Image (cartoon, grey):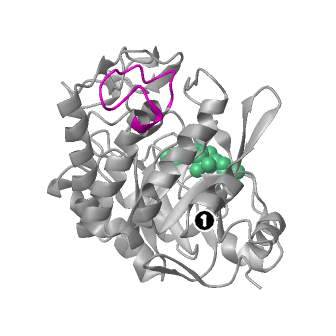
Amino acid sequence: MDSLLAPGSFGDIDLANRIVMAPMTRSRATVDGDATDLMATHYGARATAGLIVTEGIAPSEVGKGYCRTPVLDGPHRLDGWRRVTDAVHAAGGRIVAQAMHCGRVAHVANKAPGAETVAPSAIRAEGAMYTDAEGMQPFDDPRALAADEVRAVVDEYRRFAALAMDAGFDGVEVHGTSGYLPAQFLCTGTNRRTDGYGGSVEGRIRFPVEVLEAVVDEIGAGRTGLRICPGNPFNDLVDDRPEDVEETFGALLAAIRPVGLGWLHVIRRHEVNQGIFLDNLALARGLHDGALVANDSYDGPSADAAIAAGECDAVSFARHFLATPDLVARFAAGGEPERFDPRTLYTPGPVGYTVLTG
Ligand SMILES: Cc1cc2nc3c(=O)[nH]c(=O)nc-3n(C[C@H](O)[C@H](O)[C@H](O)COP(=O)(O)O)c2cc1C
């Protein structure tokens, strides 16, 4: 019977166990978006996870949303990331880079000078984000991408994938949740386009499908994954009708099924309307043939039970890894994760990141 501690594989990537470290933005890159030695220490310390998915990394300056988050947009970024992947590999681990284009969930104060904020449609997200320069600021008013610019963003993901391989990553996960650019294309409330990248379901899924095809073309399906959370309203995502959610994600998964992604990373369950929940794992199981990684609020026993029941092949943990780098050994011994300090989630420096105070 499969279990949390059994070895496994996602496409071309072999895993020592089914415990995945979920992506977590921690804002410890340089202001300019380079990976730091602190990040190498942080990830290296968690290398006993079967697989680490990095924090979201922007494929371009325009795609960067948050302060001190990393960018992977050219060879000048490689040295920093090689130190990260070397640290993980030296400790026997596997690590994939999460490609995260923030689209409209951004503020220009967090980007390089001149980098603008773009989206499928010129609709501002309700809400605000922290900037080092100006404190809390409302999200930018985005400019709608022209169709040829959308294709250029697809090429940025392709470049990202090639660079990720050069940096020594084992693969790439495309971030398709939480209100960032691919999700902005999928939702009817954020995508009001009338060209081939909007309107019908086929139009709304086109951007993420093209992104995945480009990444797969560059590095192979066995090293490519996708993260989704159908129904997640985070960052002001809204669909006109609750039934749009199931229809859109059903169409997306059906369209990419022939590609044969190495893994699908699914946040398991979300309320799509008052009291109506979508079983995202069941939706994904029915429309995806590769490995299925489940996420959200698992502990060791519940993760083990989900794998044994065949609901998923692996489980990812985010918060449990914050203050418990040796989560795998902790779970193996039947122990509990340490408590983390929420005040140091996004602060610069080692405290709460590589120096754990509890
Ligand atoms: C500090 C923090 C940063 C996060 N950053 C990202 C991110 O960059 N990309 C992403 O896909 N999810 C991100 N998430 C979401 C987590 O990957 C995960 O889905 C969520 O925390 C639920 O899993 P858990 O119950 O194991 O913590 C973040 C979560 C936290 C707590």
x and y, in percent, of residue 244 in the image: 60, 31
- Work out whether 132 lies above or below 258: above
- Residue bounds of the magenta highlight: 187-202
Q: Is residue 66 visible?
A: no
Q: Nearer the viewer, residue 194 or 118?
A: 194
Image quadrant where one finds the N terminus:
bottom right
Q: Secondary structure at mark 1?
A: strand
- Is residue 197 depicted above or below 338 in this figure? above
Q: To which quarter of the image does residue 322 belong?
A: bottom right
Task: Name the magenta segment's main secondary structure.
Answer: loop
Q: Residue at x 68, y 69 (%)?
A: 327
Q: Position of residue 208 (x, y in %)?
A: 39, 45
Residue 52, relative to residue 184: is it above or below? below
Q: Inspect the image, locate mark 1, and give the three-letter code of the amino acid beneath it.
A: Leu
Can residue 75 be seen in this snapshot?
Answer: yes
Name the residue: 45% across, 43% down: 27
Q: Position of residue 340 (x, y in %)?
A: 69, 50
Mark 1 near ligand 1 (CB under 8 Å)? Answer: no
Camera-side residue of 289 and 317: 289
190 or 14, which lies in front?
190
Q: Which residue is mark 1?
A: 292
Q: Position of residue 223 (x, y in %)?
A: 39, 70
